[in-house]
Image: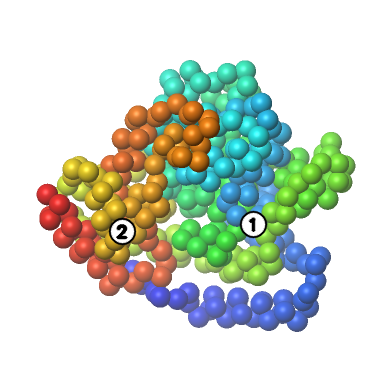
Amino acid sequence: MTPTTAPPATMRATVLGRMAELLDRSPDPTGDEHARAFETELADRFSTAHAVAVSSGTAALHTALAAYGVTAGDEVLVPGACVVMTIAAIRATGATPVLVDSPGGELDFDDLAAKTTARTQAVLPVHLAGRCADLARLTAYCADRGLRLIEDACQAQGTAYDGGWAGTFGDAGCFSTKDGKLLWSGEGGYLLTDDAAFAARARSFATHGFLPAPGQPASSRLGHNYRMPEPVAIIARANLARFDELLALRREQTRHLLDAVAGAPGLTPIEPGPRHDWNGYAPLLRVSLERPRDFCARLARRGVPNSVGTYGLTTADRLASLNDLALAPCPAARANLDTTLAIVVHEGHSTARLDEMARIITEEARQWR
């Protein structure tokens, strides 16, 4: 494992060279050479027919829902264990999010069936920390009921499930390239799909509706400015070219940290299921210590960033910003998130930094008991 504190020289040289060329022809309001090239390279890399580059993972989710016609009065089924950005994208369409309990990150299919109604238009699984739901069963469920399956795979770049890439099982997969993701570019996102009509509608929606799409003449519908900026696309392309390296590094970093905390009291690694070829997005540990959320917060204060302690990750029914929806509680999802330590790692973490985080985690766990 060779984590670095900066991207390698070859990647930096590529980015700087392309940035210089971009500046030479700027400002050009019609320029989209690198965004379009990024789309072509994404589709080739992940074996899909189409990719649409956008400005963020949240934009990707909103665009996917809007391109499939989800609107006010509709319902979208989503795990109770999800991030607020997923809910925000659903609400941006005017639709209502309906929470499905999700023990261990897996959707509860009995709860899913109980909450599927005539108003349900889509199911939106969230692959937190790169772990997937039962995508084969979920695909069949949606197909049997005529529902759209839109994957929030923002944290699942490089995860394979049953031999297929996460984000390619449903009608569309939504991804983020924000810093911290395996494929990063500061900000940004993209969608993957095999549906040509959807791709055209998504690209139009992300460009104010200016572009024509099947059944949708140019400027016949409102859209948003969700285009991926050219400087962002330049960074994203350079990192996509070394994606295998980034994927291998993240897996090695996560395994290194998990090995380094082996034996820490009250902490047990959460291993992926047998059908996963996991991307290693974040070291995951089950916390059996008392007051696990307080423990995660303590680690964050000691310099170990994590999903609960740093970002306050919780189930959507406990978010004050969604109080007006009176969302149904998801007790299994709540118990799962409350006892999960998901440690933030990224390409810039050196082995010494990982070892320091492991030392702090082990020390705090021993003192906590």
Is residue 43 in view from this perspective?
Answer: no
Task: Identify residue type, mark 1.
Answer: Ser
* Percent of width and height locating residue 99: 48, 30
Kindly identify the residue that appears in the image at 39 percent across and 74 percent down: 4
Reading the image, the residue beneath label 1 is: 55
SS state under label 1: loop
* Percent of width and height locating residue 190: 62, 52
Above or below 228: residue 340: above
Above or below 106: residue 208: below
Kindly identify the residue that appears in the image at 70 percent across and 57 percent down: 227
Counting every numbered tag in the picture gives 2
Q: Nearer the viewer, residue 318 or 151?
A: 318
Q: Does residue 171 appear left or right of residue 208 in this picture?
A: left
Kindly identify the residue that appears in the image at 53 percent across and 24 percent down: 141
Task: Identify residue type, mark 2.
Answer: Ala
Reading the image, the residue beneath label 2 is: 300
The image quarter containing residue 346 is bottom left
* Percent of width and height locating residue 208: 78, 50
The mark closer to the camera, 1 or 2, is: 2
SS state under label 2: helix
Q: Does residue 278 appear left or right of residue 214 in this picture?
A: left
Q: Nearer the viewer, residue 235 or 312?
A: 312
Q: Earlier in the sequence, mark 1 or mark 2?
A: 1
Q: Give neighbour class at mark 1: few <14, some 14-19, many 20+ (Cα, 10 Å).
A: many
Q: Nearer the viewer, residue 164 or 32?
A: 32
The image quarter containing residue 118 is top right
